[in-house]
């Protein structure tokens, strides 16, 4: 029999997790199910898998970005690719918010609800930093502490500075450059070992999610959820695939089929950061993007490309405004677009971060942050969906940058080369 690919294994874990989770949902309060199956077995399997991938994120970002920026051999080229990448991510984020606001105003998901629907919560939403502080904090005072804390923007800055230094010094630091190349190979091989248990990790994560939510928990906010998912679908299909088709001349269905393993990991982990190693290796192995470009665009995208989260914010603002009976002006909508776009820069690529960003946007337009409590219950499902959209954006940006830089890409579905993580 033909050997089962990683994609197939992950999707078996995904579908199995949904089925088992829905079976466990009616029994979730039974002590044995709650304490041992959900609280121990599923929690252990899912958390270990996520932590194992997260363990590699910081070393992978630092090493791969240093290797990528130093391999360009030309600081002007580095600046050119950086400007293209940043421009793409900010442009698509703004487009995403506009789509979300249009969808939300047409569907009006908050109609019929009032602020009495909001249950009080003791969960604290940490306020976002002012944008000027985000810019200041890009430069680390202690790069070692930045790595220990997982501050991605500071790590990226230090990695780029290290790569530029290696480029300027050239052959004088050839041994150090070779050391970074070997470290990059080592981290990717460690990823290969961890991804052998990906199907099991995905199964545990999905089962735990659906055993907690079931069907009924999502019904009161179904309209809100469908609005967000609809806007995500339009953005992923029209914006991303439209740009991919126009610039790269690639069939969107071919792209989605080849990128499926990374999408499934993103959906199950709800973290662009945790999916970063898989995204990076997928664009290199399946699409033929060079390490020089992908090692720059993918880590940067995992940090600042939050289009899916921006869509959630746009819909949530309209939803919460309707609940509280607040009429938003055109100025408020422009403030949402600007604030959410800028807030995406420097936001950690971890599950649930969208709620932190949303608090900043709500404050900007004068809406009570308490409104977040209304959507908190279903945010995990939406977080999984928008994370998948985020990493699709990372990959599309990478392919577009590679194409404009004259690279030859693999745009066919020939005999699929499975990412060597099986």
Image (cartoon, helix red, strand yellow):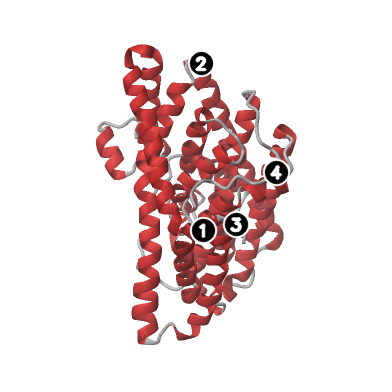
Tell me which label, 2 or 4, sits earlier in the chain: 2
Q: Which residue is drawn at 54% across and 50% down?
A: 262
Q: How far apart are marks 1 and 4 (CA)?
A: 33 Å
Tell me which label, 1 or 4, sits earlier in the chain: 1
The answer to whether residue 187 is left or right of residue 233 is left
- The residue wearing badge 3 is 315
Tell me which label, 2 or 1, sits earlier in the chain: 2
Tell me which label, 2 or 3, sits earlier in the chain: 2
Tell me, yes or no, whether the two marked residues, 2 and 4, touch with CB atoms within 8 Å. Answer: no
Between marks 4 and 3 in the image, the one whose residue lies nearer the viewer: 4
Secondary structure category for the residue under label 2: helix
Local crowd at mark 2 within 10 Å, few (<14), some, or many (≥20)? few
Q: How far apart are marks 2 and 4 (CA)?
A: 36 Å
- The residue wearing badge 1 is 383
- The residue wearing badge 2 is 76
- Camera-side residue of 17 and 419: 419
Q: Where is residue 401 in the image (x, y as percent from the top left)?
A: 60, 30
Local crowd at mark 3 within 10 Å, few (<14), some, or many (≥20)? many
Q: Distance between the residues labelled 2 and 3?
A: 40 Å
For residue 414, the mark is 4
């Amino acid at each position: 029999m033909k050997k089962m690919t990683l994609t197939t294994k992950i999707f078996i874990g995904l579908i199995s997790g949904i089925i088992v989770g829905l079976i466990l949902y009616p029994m979730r309060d039974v002590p044995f199910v709650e304490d041992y199956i959900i609280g121990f077995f599923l929690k252990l399997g899912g958390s270990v898998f996520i932590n194992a991938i997260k363990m590699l994120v910081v070393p992978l970002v630092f090493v791969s970005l240093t290797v990528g920026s130093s391999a360009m051999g030309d600081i002007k080229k580095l600046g050119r690719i950086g400007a293209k990448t940043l421009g793409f991510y900010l442009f698509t984020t703004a487009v995403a918010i506009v789509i979300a606001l249009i969808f939300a105003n047409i569907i009006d998901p908050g109609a019929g609800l009032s602020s009495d629907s909001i249950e009080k919560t003791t969960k604290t939403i940490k306020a976002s930093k002012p944008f000027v502080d985000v810019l200041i904090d890009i430069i680390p005072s202690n790069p070692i502490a930045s790595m220990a804390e997982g501050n991605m923007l500071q790590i990226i800055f230090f990695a780029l500075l290290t790569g530029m230094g290696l480029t300027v010094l050239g052959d004088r630091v050839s041994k150090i450059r070779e050391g970074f190349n070997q470290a990059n190979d080592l981290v990717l091989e460690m990823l290969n070992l961890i991804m052998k248990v990906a199907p099991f990790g995905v199964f545990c994560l999905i089962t735990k999610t659906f055993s907690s939510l079931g069907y009924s928990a999502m019904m009161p906010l179904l309209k809100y959820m469908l609005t967000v998912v609809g806007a995500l679908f339009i953005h992923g299909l029209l914006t991303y695939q439209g740009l991919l088709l126009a610039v790269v001349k690639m069939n969107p269905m071919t792209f989605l089929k080849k990128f499926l393993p990374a999408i499934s990991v993103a959906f199950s982990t709800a973290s662009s950061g945790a999916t970063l190693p898989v995204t990076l290796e997928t664009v290199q192995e399946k699409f033929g993007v060079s390490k020089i470009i992908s090692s720059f665009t993918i880590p940067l995208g995992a940090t600042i490309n939050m289009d899916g989260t921006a869509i959630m914010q746009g819909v949530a603002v309209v939803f919460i405004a309707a609940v509280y009976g607040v009429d938003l002006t055109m100025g408020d909508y422009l403030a949402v677009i600007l604030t959410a776009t800028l807030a995406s820069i420097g936001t950690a690529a971890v599950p649930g971060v969208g709620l932190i960003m949303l608090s900043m946007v709500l404050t900007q337009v004068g809406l009570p942050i308490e409104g977040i409590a209304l959507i908190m219950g279903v945010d995990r499902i939406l977080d999984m969906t928008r994370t998948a959209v985020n990493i699709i954006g990372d990959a599309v940006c990478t392919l577009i940058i590679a194409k404009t830089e004259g690279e030859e890409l693999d745009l066919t579905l020939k005999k699929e080369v499975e990412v060597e993580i099986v």
